[in-house]
Image (spheres, rainbow, N blue to C red):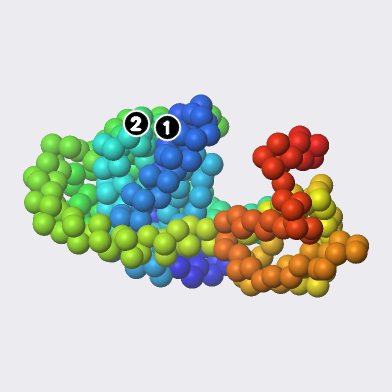
């Protein structure tokens, strides 16, 4: 989605938080985030790319939807089904002004009250709960009155900055008949959707990783000087990794008295590519040497 960098734009902001994320072991965090990305890939199939921006959050994901509050509600409700397969999520939707702005690392980010408020609201919601702000309910009522009828008051909450938020939530009783219809239709097209995800999931993952650097890891024995696109970048060991722009790079490894090694690698955003090389035949490291070299680093 193209949003003018200098002008704020009204959008609906969906914040999806994996509950108790920071308290979970790292392997479980990785598994839950992968499951959330898969659920989000399904939820976004019918949402045009030009009206959405997908961002990573420390404990989940965030999606900005331009000009279509009902689409934002659809995304949240589709992702909520992932709670039934082991991903405990709390969700929030807010509506307000956002603006594109780079973060501290120079990557694309969003700023605006809609962003911070959605994050705060998501922390009020418990597992498998969806809260929406009054501003979102009003935007939904203006564009899709029938959808807004099922959004009922959930209470008034106060955040850590002593700001009060009047929140609403979908009424399960009002939405029951609609869910039954959607379930009947979904049962018919589920196989088709899953087959579509097989083709489009990699595109979604690329969009999620867009703007992130690529990582190049080295395993050189006994050691060597590293050149990337003709520029000296250091000696490995001790150098273990480099962060580079995604794309094609020429890697050259040199060591005095040895024939240089030269190769080209295609680096992908958010991914790690390894280059391992032993300068002298028979110098490949055993697993004991690998452990020793890792400890010495």
Quarter of the C terminus within the rendering: top right
Crowd tier of the residue under label 2, counting other residues whose Cα lies within 10 Å: few below 14, some 14–19, many 20 or above: some
Q: Is residue 122 visible?
A: no
**Residue hosting label 2:** 127
Image coordinates of residue 43 in percent, x first then y, are 31, 54
How far apart marks 1 and 2 lie (CA) works out to 7 Å
**Residue hosting label 1:** 19
For marks 1 and 2, the one nearer the N-term is 1
Quick check: 284 left or right of 257? left
Image coordinates of residue 176 in percent, x first then y, are 12, 41
Residue, x 39% and y 55% (percent of image)? 12
179 or 22, which is in the foreground?
A: 22
Crowd tier of the residue under label 1, counting other residues whose Cα lies within 10 Å: few below 14, some 14–19, many 20 or above: many
> Helix, strand, or loop for circle 1?
loop
Assess whether mark 2 and mark 1 are in contact (beta carbons under 8 angstroms). Answer: yes
Residue, x 35% and y 64% (percent of image)? 200
Quarter of the N terminus within the rendering: bottom left
293 or 265, which is in the foreground?
A: 293
4 or 161, which is in the foreground?
A: 4
Quick check: 36 left or right of 59? left
Q: Is residue 184 above or below residue 87?
A: below
Q: Is residue 49 above or below residue 169?
A: below
Quick check: 200 left or right of 271? left
Image coordinates of residue 296 in percent, x first then y, are 81, 37
Residue, x 42% and y 65% (percent of image)? 203
Q: Is residue 14 above or below residue 293?
A: below
241 or 4, which is in the foreground?
A: 241
Q: Is residue 173 visible?
A: yes
Q: Is residue 140 above or below residue 157?
A: below
Quick check: 66 left or right of 8? left
């Amino acid at each position: 989605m193209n949003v003018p960098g200098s002008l704020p734009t009204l959008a609906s902001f969906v914040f999806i938080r994996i509950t108790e994320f920071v308290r979970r072991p790292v392997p479980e965090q990785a598994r839950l985030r992968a499951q959330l990305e898969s659920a989000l890939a399904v939820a976004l199939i019918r949402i045009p790319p030009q009206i959405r921006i997908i961002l990573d959050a420390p404990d989940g994901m965030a999606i900005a939807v331009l000009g279509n509050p009902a689409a934002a509600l659809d995304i949240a409700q589709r992702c909520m089904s992932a709670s039934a397969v082991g991903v405990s999520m709390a969700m929030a939707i807010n509506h307000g002004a956002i603006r594109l702005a780079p973060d501290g690392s120079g990557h694309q980010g969003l700023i605006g009250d809609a962003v911070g408020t959605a994050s705060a609201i998501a922390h009020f919601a418990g597992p498998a709960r969806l809260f929406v702000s009054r501003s979102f309910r009003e935007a939904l009522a203006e564009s899709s009155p029938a959808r807004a009828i099922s959004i009922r008051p959930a209470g008034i909450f106060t955040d850590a900055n002593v700001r009060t938020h009047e929140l609403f939530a979908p009424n399960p009783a009002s939405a029951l008949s609609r869910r039954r219809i959607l379930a009947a239709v979904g049962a018919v097209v589920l196989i088709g959707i899953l087959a579509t995800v097989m083709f489009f999931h990699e595109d979604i993952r690329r969009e999620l990783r867009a703007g992130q650097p690529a990582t190049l890891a080295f395993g050189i024995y006994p050691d060597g000087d590293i050149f990337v696109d003709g520029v000296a970048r250091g000696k490995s060991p001790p150098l273990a990794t480099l962060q580079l722009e995604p794309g094609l790079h020429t890697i050259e490894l040199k060591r005095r008295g040895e024939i240089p090694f030269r190769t080209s690698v295609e680096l992908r955003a958010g991914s790690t590519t390894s280059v391992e090389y032993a300068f002298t035949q028979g110098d490949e490291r055993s697993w004991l040497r690998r452990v020793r070299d890792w400890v010495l680093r």
